[in-house]
């Protein structure tokens, strides 16, 4: 089934013309039941316009380009169920971008509606196909934007992509991979959401054929090898049901349908099983020809007949008759125990539902015209919610995409308002999601809910069938942690909006304080001056600065150190902190000199020694000397972590030692400071060390996380006294939590 035959294209001009006409006629045939007066001429004009425009272009396979728009139009009509206007748009979909034809030409010839759709298709094409610098996530968002504009744009684009995927063989390997991955990432999920199950499966299978060639071939081969056995089984399973259905006078079709290669592969991966262990390689489908008012009753009657023969698994019965999925899918699914103890899924639906399942949104419109009661507003609701989210200019694309996609495939639950209105939410949605699904104002004020008359918290997970009443309070404000327990994209984006608004309000106080300070300094609120302050405090925006001032993370005290030149404010130059640790040589030198500073017993001038690395003693510390086996004499602090052990076990090797004062030589020591993460904190610390106390800094690293910072500072001090002064002085800094000398 997947033998790749790259057909050599070798038609002469005459044959080519015939072939084009043949395709065109096939399109007209497919459109025939829908052609109204004047439509045939319009389709012809579109075909001629496209054929003319693409006359000199060929596809990678060598065939004339017009084959592609013709095929896309055919898919739109036959596989998606779109009508005349969409077919015209499909014929023209590549003209404006790739040929001399302009949008004005299209509008003049076919009017506003068609020009608008062709414009949408051109824009998607420019965004997605030719721009390599944007991410797929960005693309996805842009595609959804056009979808919110007119869903036909996206349906035609899906047809375009499907045809490109079907003819991907002639592309380079690199292109194949790019297009295939994009298909899985963007187009298959969209097809799913729009209820186009067949197209979704085909896109996934085609993509897998290129991205996971080996697996694809292996599963295809195994499916082929097991086909005979499967057919026998299916016939055995179907036989008794078929007989009764006929006796009962049903008009129906019944058949077994293999699952897609991609979905089998998914099962193998997610369940960690072998191909042979995947029990549902196929499903049985029963399609009834029922009048619309008897649909539900007849589906349940069939259910009853099936379960007369085979035992159903109650947990695996899905009633999408009473509550269709939000993408419009309607059917009754039941899994029963078939012959040989195998579970078999049976899908029962009517012809109308089947059309719906295969052609999705387009079929929806068609039936909507005939019967106003069917599934009227589901899609409209969905489009509205997409539009709402997309219209928020601040929404982060990646967040949005993650939310959106997680909502795409999840199962749904059905919950009710106190008045009995139905709401569809993803599985694991909480009371707060429900509140936001009613209205963002209700969500923002939500303090809890009553689920089936019992009081529950905001984070309570809802279940199908729950009746939910939201309790609100005017004092309520959305908070950051709400984001941890909402699931729906709508709730998330509304909470983020509210938080931002809240921040904006708080920031107003900070802004007033800031303006007073500036006024005090006698400088204006010019762009330059504001920038100078923002940069000094390392804030990303004025809003952030005002907010930090308002919540007292920044006190603006440092503004006093700014220079005022006329109306211009200038931030003090940051203290230069050498980034490199003391060069090796300098350390050695220090070590050599300090030999003169230490006294063992009476005179120790001649004794070579080293300062222990474990505790790095400095003059003034209580120290002892220790004679090592291989490295001579080492000086440790008496409170060194190793001291107790050395003193206890090797008392005979210990030498009494004391310091002699010498202010000319400095010793390297380390400090550890922990405190509140505050802009300007480095500035404040370095200011004390090198500015006030004139102590040299050898190295400094600051790490901050979760509102705290930890700083490691290496300084040169003369003795312990000086170090203590430094520690005391640093302790007076606001927000310092702990400060200690490094023991190692
Ligand atoms: Mn195209």
Image (tube, rainbow, N blue to C red):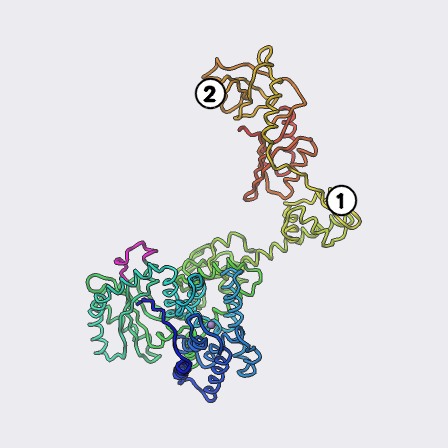
Residue 426 falls in image quadrant: bottom left
Mark 2 C-beta closer than 8 Å to ligand 1: no
Q: Report x, y in % for residue 678.
A: 62, 43
Instruction: Report the residue marked by disc 1.
Output: 563
Q: Is residue 424 visible?
A: no
Q: Is residue 108 magenta?
A: no
Residue 737 falls in image quadrant: top right
Q: What segment is highlighted magenta in the picture?
A: 268-280
* Mark 1 residue crowding within 10 angstroms, few (<14) / some (14–19) / many (20+): few
Q: Secondary structure at mark 2?
A: helix
Q: Is residue 276 magenta?
A: yes
Q: Is residue 560 visible?
A: yes
Q: Can you tell which mark lies on residue 432? A: none
User: Residue placed farthest to the right in the image?
Assistant: 566
Judge whether 557 appears above or below 408 on screen.
above
Q: Report x, y in % for residue 556.
A: 69, 45
User: Residue placed farthest to the top in the image?
Assistant: 602
In this rendered view, identify the residue nearer to me: 460 or 71. 71
Residue 703 falls in image quadrant: top right
Instruction: Report the residue marked by disc 2.
Output: 645
Considering only order in the chain, which callout, 2 or 1, is on the residue closer to the N terminus?
A: 1
> Residue, x 72% and y 52% (percent of image)?
528
* Mark 2 residue crowding within 10 angstroms, few (<14) / some (14–19) / many (20+): few
Q: CA distance from mark 1 to mark 2?
A: 57 Å
* Horizontal relation, residue 545 to residue 36: left or right: right
How many marks do you count on the picture? 2
> Residue, x 48% and y 19% (percent of image)?
630
Q: Report x, y in % for residue 408.
A: 43, 63
* Horizontal relation, residue 87 to residue 690: left or right: left
């Amino acid at each position: 089934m997947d033998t790749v035959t790259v057909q050599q294209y070798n038609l002469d001009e005459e044959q080519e013309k015939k072939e084009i006409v043949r395709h065109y006629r096939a399109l007209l045939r497919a459109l025939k039941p829908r052609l109204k007066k004047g439509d045939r001429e319009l389709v012809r004009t579109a075909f001629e316009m496209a054929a003319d425009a693409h006359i000199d272009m060929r596809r990678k396979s060598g065939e004339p380009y017009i084959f592609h728009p013709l095929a896309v139009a055919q898919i739109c009509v036959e596989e998606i169920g779109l009508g005349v206007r969409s077919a015209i748009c499909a014929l023209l979909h590549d003209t404006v971008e790739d040929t001399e034809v302009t949008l004005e030409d299209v509008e003049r010839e076919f009017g506003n509606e068609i020009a608008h759709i062709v414009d949408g298709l051109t824009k998607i094409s420019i965004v997605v196909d030719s721009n390599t610098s944007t991410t797929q996530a960005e693309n996805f968002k842009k595609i959804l934007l056009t979808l919110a504009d007119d869903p036909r744009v996206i349906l035609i684009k899906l047809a375009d992509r499907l045809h490109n995927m079907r003819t991907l063989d002639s592309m380079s390997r690199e292109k194949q991979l790019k297009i295939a991955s994009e298909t899985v990432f963007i187009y298959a999920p969209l097809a799913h959401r729009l209820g186009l199950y067949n197209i979704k499966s085909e896109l996934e299978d085609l993509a897998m054929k290129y991205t996971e060639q080996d697996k694809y071939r292996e599963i295809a081969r195994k499916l082929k090898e097991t086909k005979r056995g499967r057919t026998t089984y299916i016939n055995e399973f179907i036989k008794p049901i078929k007989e009764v259905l006929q006796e009962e006078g049903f008009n129906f079709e019944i058949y077994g349908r293999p699952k897609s290669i991609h979905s089998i592969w998914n099962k193998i991966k997610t369940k960690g099983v072998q191909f042979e262990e995947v029990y549902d390689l196929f499903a049985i489908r029963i399609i009834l020809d029922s009048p619309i008012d008897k649909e539900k009753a007849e589906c349940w009657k069939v259910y009853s007949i099936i379960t007369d023969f085979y035992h159903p698994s109650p947990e695996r019965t899905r009633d999408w008759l009473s509550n269709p999925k939000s993408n419009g899918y309607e059917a009754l699914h039941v899994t029963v125990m078939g012959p040989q103890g195998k579970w078999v899924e049976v899908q029962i639906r009517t012809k109308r539902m089947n059309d719906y399942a295969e052609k999705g949104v387009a079929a929806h419109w068609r039936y909507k015209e005939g019967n106003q009661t069917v599934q009227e507003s589901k899609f409209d609701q969905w489009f509205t919610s997409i539009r709402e989210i997309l219209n928020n200019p601040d929404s982060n694309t990646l967040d949005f995409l993650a939310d959106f996609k997680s909502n795409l495939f999840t199962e749904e639950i059905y919950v009710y308002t106190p008045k009995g209105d139905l709401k569809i939410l993803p599985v694991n949605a909480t009371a707060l999601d429900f509140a936001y699904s009613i209205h963002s104002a209700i969500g923002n004020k939500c303090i809890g809910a009553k689920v089936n008359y019992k009081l529950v918290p905001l984070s309570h997970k809802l279940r199908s069938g729950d009746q939910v009443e939201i309790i609100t309070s005017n004092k309520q404000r959305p908070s950051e942690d709400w984001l941890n327990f909402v699931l729906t994209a709508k709730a998330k984006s509304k909470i983020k909006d509210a938080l931002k608004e809240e921040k904006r309000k708080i920031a107003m106080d900070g802004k007033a304080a800031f303006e007073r300070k500036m006024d005090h300094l006698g400088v204006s609120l010019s762009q330059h001056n504001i920038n100078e302050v923002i940069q000094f405090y390392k804030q990303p925006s004025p809003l952030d600065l005002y907010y930090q001032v308002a919540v007292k993370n920044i006190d603006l005290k440092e503004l006093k150190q700014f220079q005022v030149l006329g109306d211009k404010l200038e931030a003090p130059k940051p203290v230069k902190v050498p980034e490199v640790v003391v060069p090796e040589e300098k350390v050695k030198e220090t070590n050599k000199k300090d030999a003169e500073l230490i006294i063992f017993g009476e005179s120790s001038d001649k004794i070579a020694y080293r300062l222990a690395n474990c505790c790095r003693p400095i003059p003034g510390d209580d120290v002892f000397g220790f004679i090592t086996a291989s490295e001579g004499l080492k000086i440790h602090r008496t409170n060194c972590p190793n001291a107790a052990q050395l003193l206890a076990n090797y008392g005979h090797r210990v030498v009494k030692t004391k310091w002699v004062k010498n202010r000319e030589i400095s010793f390297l020591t380390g400090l550890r400071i922990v405190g509140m993460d505050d802009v300007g904190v480095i500035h404040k610390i370095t200011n004390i060390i090198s500015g006030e106390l004139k102590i040299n800094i050898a190295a400094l690293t600051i790490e901050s996380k979760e509102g705290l910072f930890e700083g490691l500072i290496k300084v040169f001090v003369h003795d312990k006294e000086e170090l203590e002064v430094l520690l005391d002085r640093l302790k007076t800094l606001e927000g310092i939590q702990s400060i200690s000398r490094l023991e190692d």
